[in-house]
Amino acid sequence: MTPPVTETTATANGVTSSPEASQVFHVEHRCGRTGHRIELARYTVDGGEERIVFGQRVDGVVRITDVPAHGHGRAYLVERGLEHDGYGALKALVADYVAQGELLAAVPMTVSPLESEASAEVAR
């Protein structure tokens, strides 16, 4: 199943801006309903693999996932339960996640905090 095609504009940090992006956060669904998966950002990891960060409301809970753009490979749950923190928190999380992915050239969910600190020390 492919996500719905939407009009998006990529910003400098890879986070997309679309009319639908805020709907992930603001549109409520009755219990038991799953909302549309909305593309929030794209980034590229080592080896040129493109990844997509999606937002989706499932049973009233906002979930952020990281999936391969071409459908092959592992998907990761990045965060859930952001509906209590506000739309600004969702945007900040996605922007930081994409920045980390580009800095590490890897899916941030696969890198341990210790590896991340070591990479930051080497870059300095």
Image (cartoon, helix red, strand yellow):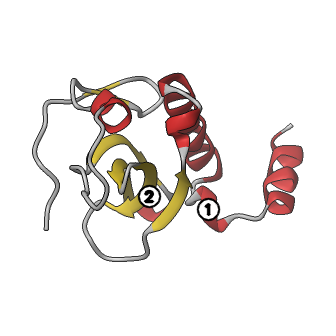
Disc 2 designates what residue?
Answer: 66
Mark 2 surroundings: few (<14), some (14-19) or many (≥20) residues within 10 A = many
User: Would you say the residues marked 2 and 1 are in contact, meaning their CB atoms lie under 8 Å apart?
Assistant: yes
State the count of labels: 2
In the rendered view, would you say 114 is above or below 96?
A: below
Amino acid at dot 2: Asp
Q: Position of residue 22 (x, y in %)?
A: 32, 28
The x and y percentages for residue 12 are 43, 23
Which of 91 and 59 lies nearest the eye of the viewer? 59
Residue 1 in the image: above or below residue 54: below
Q: Which quadrant of the view contains residue 120?
A: top right
Looking at numbered disc 1 in the image, what kind of residue is underneath it? Met
In the displayed structure, 15 sits above or below 68; it is above
Q: Residue at x 54, y 41 (%)?
A: 82
Q: Foreground residue, 89 or 105?
A: 89
- The spot of residue 55 in percent (x, y) is 37, 46
Q: Secondary structure at mark 1?
A: helix
In the current view of this chain or complex, which residue is farthest to the left? 5
Q: Is 1 displayed left or right of 112 in the figure?
A: left
Report the quarter where the C terminus lies.
Answer: top right
In the picture, the disc for residue 109 is 1
Q: Which mark is residue 57?
A: none
Q: Residue at x 14, y 61 (%)?
A: 2
Relative placement, left or right, of 30 versus 93 is left
**Is tag 2's residue or tag 1's residue first in the polypeptide sequence?**
2
